[in-house]
Amino acid sequence: MTVPAVSFEFFPPKNLEASFKLWDTVQVLSPLAPRFVSVTYGAGGTTRDLTRDAVATLHKHMGLNTAAHLTCVNATREETLAVADSFAAAGVTELVALRGDPPKGAGAFSVHPGGFANSVELVEALADKGKFTIRVGAYPEPHPESPDTAADVAWLKRKFQAGADEAITQFFFETETFLRFRDDCARAGIDKPVVPGIMPIENWKGMRKFAAGCGAHFPDTLVDAFEKADRDGRADLLATALCTEMCDRLLSEGVENLHFYTLNKPELTRDVCHALGVTPQARFENVA
């Protein structure tokens, strides 16, 4: 079996308890030698300072290749690029450039006065600086604001043409979803890496609601399987088995990199990685 290169997404802590949780998560997953870890940016840019602090800490004290999320929300172009420059000053030159979600309760995305209108404009401005590795989002199922997958593929191509280096997909629950999207990208002339985003199902009821808001289809077969597993106390075992099986199929279809959305809950991600042959590396075992 091909052993994948893995990467992990974390979100920045908002309080002391969450800080310990992030630290514990990093301690569990960093020995797996990820090719990078990313730190999210809250809806409406609400965690901008927390993201910067978390990114700097992981980069400086943990020795991890760290990528910072950056969005277009609630900031002018100058403010957004100043944040990017502050990441670079801290030694972080990898970014995940996104349009971003509006603040909770704000409804649809609206362009901030003097701000970037979309992710393509943001990517173009970051690429012009010539000092960043830029990753972007991709949607193997239609984005909630998109008419269809063809439009999403066309938009992804525009992001690559603007200067993006790699894309990470939204999570999905069926292998064929990603494989069809990869084929669509290839037919559109996209030749840069498109990495599948993987979300182990830590809480299937919460995940089902979350998926609905993201446009990700949660199959009825999963509902039936998890209802039975809950009754038997085997939900985590089922989640690990299903995620491992999906990842193994992706690897057999030529996928080399996997990006895990951890939700700062590392156990399922660790177990899936171990099942795929991703094991602790000596140089990371004593990181503190």
Image (spheres, helix red, strand yellow):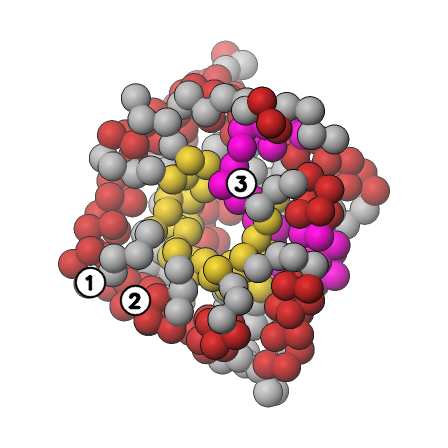
The disc labelled 2 sits on which kind of residue? Answer: Lys
Residue pictured at 38% horizontal, 73% vertical? 162
Residue 225 found in image quarter: top left
**SS of the residue under disc 1:** loop
Distance between mark 3 and mark 2 Cα atoms: 24 Å
Residue pictured at 42% horizontal, 21% vertical? 277
Which of the labelled discs sits on residue 8, or is there none?
A: 3
**Mark 1, residues whose alpha carbon is within 10 Å: few (<14), some, or many (≥20)?**
few
Residue denoted by label 1:
189
Q: Please, is residue 123 above or below residue 259 in the view? A: below
**SS of the residue under disc 2:** helix
The answer to which of 3 and 147 lies nearer the viewer is 3
Mark with earlier residue (1, 3):
3
Residue pictured at 33% horizontal, 38% vertical? 256
Q: Please, is residue 185 above or below residue 163 in the view? A: above
Residue denoted by label 2:
157
Q: Residue furthest top?
A: 232
**Mark 3, residues whose alpha carbon is within 10 Å: few (<14), some, or many (≥20)?**
many
Mark with earlier residue (3, 2):
3
- Residue numbers of the magenta segment: 27-56
**Contact, CB < 8 Å: mark 3 with mark 2?**
no
Chief secondary structure of the magenta portion: helix
Distance between mark 2 and mark 1 Cα atoms: 8 Å
Which of the labelled discs sits on residue 66, or is there none?
A: none
Across and down, in percent, residue 239 comes to 46, 25
Across and down, in percent, residue 195 comes to 37, 47
**Contact, CB < 8 Å: mark 2 with mark 1?**
yes
Residue pictured at 54% horizontal, 29% vertical? 32
Q: Please, is residue 246 above or below residue 120 in the view? A: above
